[in-house]
Amino acid sequence: MQSLQIDTPSLVSPIPTVAIGDRSPLILGVMASGSGSNFEAVALAIENGRLNAKIAVLIHNKPEIKAIDRAQHYGIPTVFLDRRNYPTREELDRAIVGTLQAHQVECVVMAGWMLVVTQVLIDAFPDRIINIHPSLLPSFRGIHAIEQALAARVKITGCTVHLVSLEVDAGPILVQAAVPVLPDDTAETLHARIQIQEHLILPQAIEIFTRT
Ligand code: GRF
């Protein structure tokens, strides 16, 4: 049986990289709740000189996640903020803002942060918070985007990097990439292919911020 080409190019043109040294690195704070493969894609882009940025801190809201190991590998400090210690989401976000400001963060990257943010965080970093979502927004918002795409029997789905607004998965879109849905796809196989594209477009989207 003929094998199918599963990697698709990004829908966007490659964004030229600003030469390292032209300006000081953009200071990033990354927020993650799980594996942290997108966090690592950003760290790798910085290490390879494709992104003029520095990750000052990784904030996580679950203990013992793989993202912590990845941060240690790159020498990036981690801060655990347990939501159970904060009676409201606003109070959790105030702690997040305090941590980000203590690390002089200029741009916040939600890389698989599985909590809804409040106005507290948005007000502290207006138009400076980006999120990665595993669908071609505005289709399939929310936490089960991949299952929604499979249930809808779409032939193409993908991933989106967008600015964060109070409405979930609804802020202005920065970069998208398309991924075909194959006939025998499961949520796992489709997610794995979407993640290949996520790891490309997240550093691209951050690159936009390094030029603003
Ligand atoms: C990604 O698929 C992202 O789109 C979603 O959460 C997942 C995080 O994956 N918001 P990882 O932790 O970066 O591997």
Image (cartoon, rainbow, N blue to C red):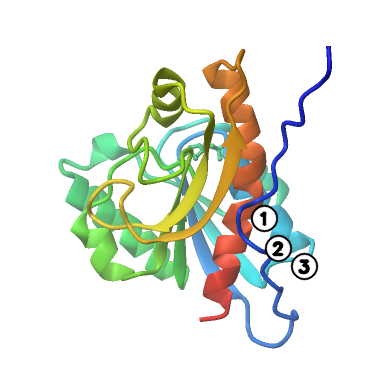
Locate residue 78, reporting x and y percent: 53, 50
> Which residue is identified by label 3?
49
Mark 1, residue position? 43
Identify the secondary structure beneath mark 2: helix
2 and 1 marks in contact (CB < 8 Å): yes
Real-space CA distance between mark 3 and mark 2, rounded to the nearest whole angstrom: 5 Å
Q: How far across and down, in percent of the image, does residue 36 sit?
A: 57, 40
Three-letter amino acid code of the residue under disc 1: Ala
In the rendered image, the quadrant that contains the N terminus is top right
* Position of residue 186 in the picture relative to residue 136 (left or right): right
15 above or below 47? below
CB atoms of marks 1 and 3 within 8 Å: no
Q: Which residue is drawn at the image coordinates 72% and 31% (left, top)?
A: 6
Q: Nearer the viewer, residue 83 or 39?
A: 39
Q: Are marks 3 and 2 in contact (CB under 8 Å)?
A: yes
Residue 143 x, y percent position in the rendering: 36, 31
Residue hosting label 2: 46
